[in-house]
Each structure stands twice: as structure tokens, then as C-alpha cells.
Image: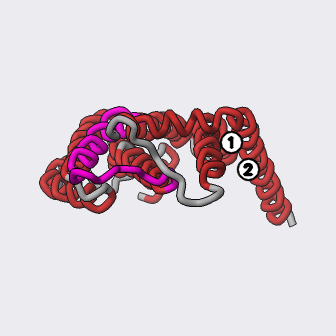
């Protein structure tokens, strides 16, 4: 009975924290709603800057001019409230963690969030201008480049996700070393395969142009090296004192 009550209390707490997160995102969306068209203009700026003079985007569906900016506003609201959402996640799982796990988890949550934002910024400020300039520069003479705003949004979100996840590489490497799955020496030996794998991943998740593939693969390799370097300071998890006591008592 106690276990059932505990399980129900966890479910109620989970529900409350999910509701709080949704309310926070909803409030952010309501606040950003009046600025939705302007937010899309900011998102589309890298593409518009590379179109020929007088070039513009198009909307092929009747409802697209309204719903696409709303999607951008919702995405922006989620990103703004992401620290609060992650805090709710942390508050839910923290009571079940050991002290050494708590010390590691919070820095990893903060750093992984920051790295994801850095990956998105890298794509927006560096990758998009080069990719769009490369693509529009190869348009045949007499062809007007006019991208549909819904397809452009899908493309941008895909690139944001790809670069955001790619910039999580150091966190993944540190976790693998910390959990004892692999050693730092093994990661160094795996370096040539990582380089090949980075270019394969870049070829799969980015558009079929050399520029975007190169600009994803190179950061992946550099972030892998950063993860190896940081793992040297973190090291593997040492056995707890209670475990050592049990082992010694059994001898």
C-alpha cells in the first residue's frame, strides 16, 4: 500500500511539473504572439540577405502566412523557457540521485543547454550565410529563387537540431568516460574512425553541398577532441565508500 501511495505521489508530482512547464511555455507564446511576423523575419534574414535584389519568399498554402510565424513564436517561447523546464525535470529526478550524481548532473544539464544554444547560434550566424550564398549563387540564369516559407522553416529547424545535437558531443564523451563505458585512451585510439564518422553524419543530416557538410564535420571533430581533453579532468566514477566496505567485509 505504501509503495502504491508513493507511486501515485510521484505521478502527481510529475503531472504538476509538466503542467507548470506547459504553462510557462504558454505564457511565453502569448507574450511573443504579437511579434510572430517579426520573429520569422529575423529567422529568414540569412536567406533573404542572399537572394538577388528584390527577391522574396513565397507562401503556397492559404494558411501558411499565419501558421508559420506562430510556429516560430512557439519555438522561441520554448527556447526562452527551456531553463525553467529543465529545472522542473531536475527537481523531479534529483531526490532519487546520490550526492555524487547530483554534483555531476546539474553542471551537465546547464552545459548541455548552453552547448545546444551555441550550436544553433553557430548554424544561424556562420553556416546559414555561407550555405545560402553557395546555393543561390549556383542558380541558373533566368531562374528566380523564391523559397516557400514553410519549407524554409522545416529546413532551418532541421539544421538547428543537427548542429545543436552535434555540439553535445563533449557531454556525451564525458558521460561515457564517467560511467566507465570507455577510457580516454580508447577514445584517442578511436579518433580516425570518429573523423570518418563525422563526415558521414554530416553528409546524412545536412543538405547535399560541401559547405554545410564541412561546417558540421569539422566542429564535430573539434568537439570530440574537447570532450577527450575534459574527460582527462573528470575521470571515471570511483566506487563509493559503502561499496568498498561491503567488499572488504566479504573478504
Circle 1 sits on which residue? 88
Where does the C terminus fall, quadrant-wise?
bottom left
Tell me which residue sits at (78%, 58%) in the image: 11
Does 114 appear in magenta?
Answer: no
For disc 1, the neighbor class at 10 Å (few under 14, some 14 to 19, many from 20) is: some
Q: Which mark is residue 18?
A: 2
Residue 208, visible in the rendered structure: yes
Quarter location, residue 15: bottom right
Nearest to N terminus: mark 2 or mark 1: 2
Does 139 appear in magenta?
Answer: yes
Residue 228, visible in the rendered structure: no
SS of the residue at dot 2? helix
Quarter location, residue 51: top left
- Kindly check if marks 2 and 1 are in contact, taking CB atoms under 8 A apart as contact: yes
Q: Is residue 42 left or right of residue 75?
A: left
- How far is the residue under mark 2 from the one under mark 1? 8 Å
| Percent x, y of residue 106 | 54, 36
State which region is magenta: 121-150
| Percent x, y of residue 5 | 85, 61
Quarter location, residue 32: top right
Amino acid at each position: 500500500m505504501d509503495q502504491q501511495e508513493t507511486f501515485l505521489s510521484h505521478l502527481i508530482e510529475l503531472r504538476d511539473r509538466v503542467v507548470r512547464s506547459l504553462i510557462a511555455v504558454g505564457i511565453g507564446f502569448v507574450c511573443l504572439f504579437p511579434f510572430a511576423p517579426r520573429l520569422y523575419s529575423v529567422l529568414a534574414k540569412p536567406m533573404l540577405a542572399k537572394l538577388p535584389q528584390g527577391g522574396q519568399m513565397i507562401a503556397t498554402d492559404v494558411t501558411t502566412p499565419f501558421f508559420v510565424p506562430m510556429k516560430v513564436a512557439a519555438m522561441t517561447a520554448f527556447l526562452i523557457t527551456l531553463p525553467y523546464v529543465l529545472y522542473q525535470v531536475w527537481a523531479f529526478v534529483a531526490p532519487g540521485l546520490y550526492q555524487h550524481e547530483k554534483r555531476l548532473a546539474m553542471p551537465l544539464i546547464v552545459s548541455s543547454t548552453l552547448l545546444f544554444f551555441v550550436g544553433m547560434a553557430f548554424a544561424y550566424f556562420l553556416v546559414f550565410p555561407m550555405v545560402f550564398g553557395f546555393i543561390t549563387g549556383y542558380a541558373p540564369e533566368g531562374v528566380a529563387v523564391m523559397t516557400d516559407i514553410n519549407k524554409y522553416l522545416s529546413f532551418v529547424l532541421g539544421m538547428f537540431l543537427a548542429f545543436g545535437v552535434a555540439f553535445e558531443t563533449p557531454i556525451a564523451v564525458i558521460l561515457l568516460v564517467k560511467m566507465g563505458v570507455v577510457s580516454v585512451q580508447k577514445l584517442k585510439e578511436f579518433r580516425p574512425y570518429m573523423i570518418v564518422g563525422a563526415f558521414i553524419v554530416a553528409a546524412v543530416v545536412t543538405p547535399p553541398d560541401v559547405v554545410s557538410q564541412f561546417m558540421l564535420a569539422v566542429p564535430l571533430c573539434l568537439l570530440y577532441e574537447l570532450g577527450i581533453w575534459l574527460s582527462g579532468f573528470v575521470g571515471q566514477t570511483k566506487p563509493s565508500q559503502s561499496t568498498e566496505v561491503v567488499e572488504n567485509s566479504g573478504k
